[in-house]
Image (cartoon, helix red, strand yellow):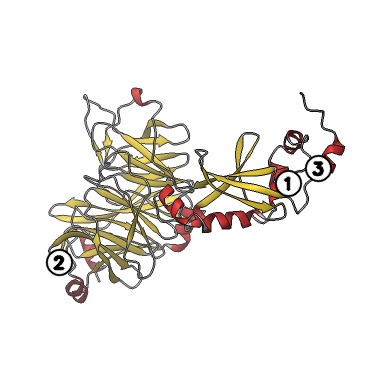
Amino acid sequence: MAKKPLFESDISNNIPSNKDQVIVNFYNFDNKLLYENKYSFENVISDATKDFLEKNIETLQKLFKKELNKNNIFYYIKKNDNLERIEDYNKTISFYIYNLQDTIALLYHNSSTTTFSNSFSLNIYIKYKYRYKHIIEKIEEYIINNTYLIGKPILNEAEYYLYNKYTKQLKIIKYSKEDRNNLQLKYYSSSDNYCNANNFLYIYENNYKYDNIDSNRLISIDLINNKINLISSNFPKRILHSMIYIPECYIFIIGGKNTKEVLIYKIKEYNINYKKYPYLLPYEVLEPSLIYINNKYLYIFENSTIDFKILRINLSHISPFEIIEIKNKKYIKMNQKFFGVVKNKNSILFLGGQMINLNNEINKNCFEFHYDTNNLVRSRREFQSFDINEKTFIPLGSDIYMQLIEYKKGSKYVPKILFFDGRIQEVEKSEKESMENKI
């Protein structure tokens, strides 16, 4: 028998009272029921989510296979077959039943019953989203406002270059004898890696023998007072990896031979530990070029073998690595390797590295990647060969970026400052100038 039509008077007569109860069900995104409990219509959503968390800790840890952080759990309610995230947990359960679900349909479905007691249910769907709490909204602006000293370890020396963006001076700083002895500091080698982070230089030392165990060390140098600190001697062995600073306090260590794990070090006083990114790289990447774009995507470029690869992750809601398909891949041969990267309007420009001759390729221009269209094109900029260890150019001001490099001049390595503001400017420091600035 068909149900009778539902009139406005039926609805007003059947609005549940505070004495009525509703069953709240918690499901994962695969529609598996995780928990259910009864509440009154005057209970707020946070009453239900609090109960859910307190009574399901072990279940959630098994489900997400990670150390549980309740701040990373998000709750959703279905509206018109779409899942919408709950934003206000202080609203009542009745609010979500009548405003996010189809109220008329619910009442019509129950109109033949004499009471609404225990006849309502609310389904809540949960999702665990890994995320980092301390990523600044305007990354480039943060670096520009907080960084004025940039360092670079000197190859085969226990020294580093120090550039001051205010005075525009470049100096050479020697490790003190005390630091060298106490910390057993070694000469910087081509198998080590480093990155700048807010007036600090972080060096990832490779192949350090510690208590007869091969391990890597993470060292920080305070560029303001030249104080060197050994963070840890127990970081995983890495070779052919890259590092990038993500403000406010994260260093990502990405790539390396025989590994797909990404390490994250949180810059924090007395922190000697690293964590692993929740997802593995889809494949091994060697000496990847890294850049963070539009406060959202961390791009990873790798061209150490025949195939040029692009990956990215969205750090606003930590996600698996996404393989980016180049739309015009079959029309272009990518033969620039081990390059640095810099933002250039709506593209990422590849600078330096090596240009490999492929099939008598005579075009000597750099490449650039348009991330809005996923197209790889030849830039108008002529390729210049230089080795760049820290692959990311550092923002100095509005659309101005810089990086320190070394090149061999005779038997000596000579520093050069690269500035990019839509074009490359090179400031070379002679050996005499460098020696005059030596401290």
Task: Specify the label residue 117 is tagged with.
Answer: 1
**On-image quarter of the N terminus:** top right
Say few, some or many: other residues with alpha carbon within 10 Å of mark 2 (under 14 / 14 to 19 / 20 or more). few
Mark 1: amino acid: Ser
Quarter of image, res 306:
top left
Mark 2: amino acid: Asp
Residue 424 coordinates in the image, percent (x, y): 36, 46
Quarter of image, res 237:
bottom left
Q: Secondary structure at mark 1?
A: loop
Task: Specify the label residue 29 is tagged with.
Answer: none
As drawn, is 412 to the left or to the right of 150? left
Residue 356 coordinates in the image, percent (x, y): 22, 33
Residue picked out by circle 3: 14
| Front one among 327 and 13 | 13
Q: Secondary structure at mark 2?
A: loop
Quarter of image, res 378:
top left
In percent of the image, x 32 and y 56: which residue is there? 195
Residue 51 coordinates in the image, percent (x, y): 57, 57
Q: Secondary structure at mark 3?
A: helix
Residue picked out by circle 2: 211
| Front one among 147 and 87 | 87
| Front one among 332 and 294 | 294
Mark 3: amino acid: Asn
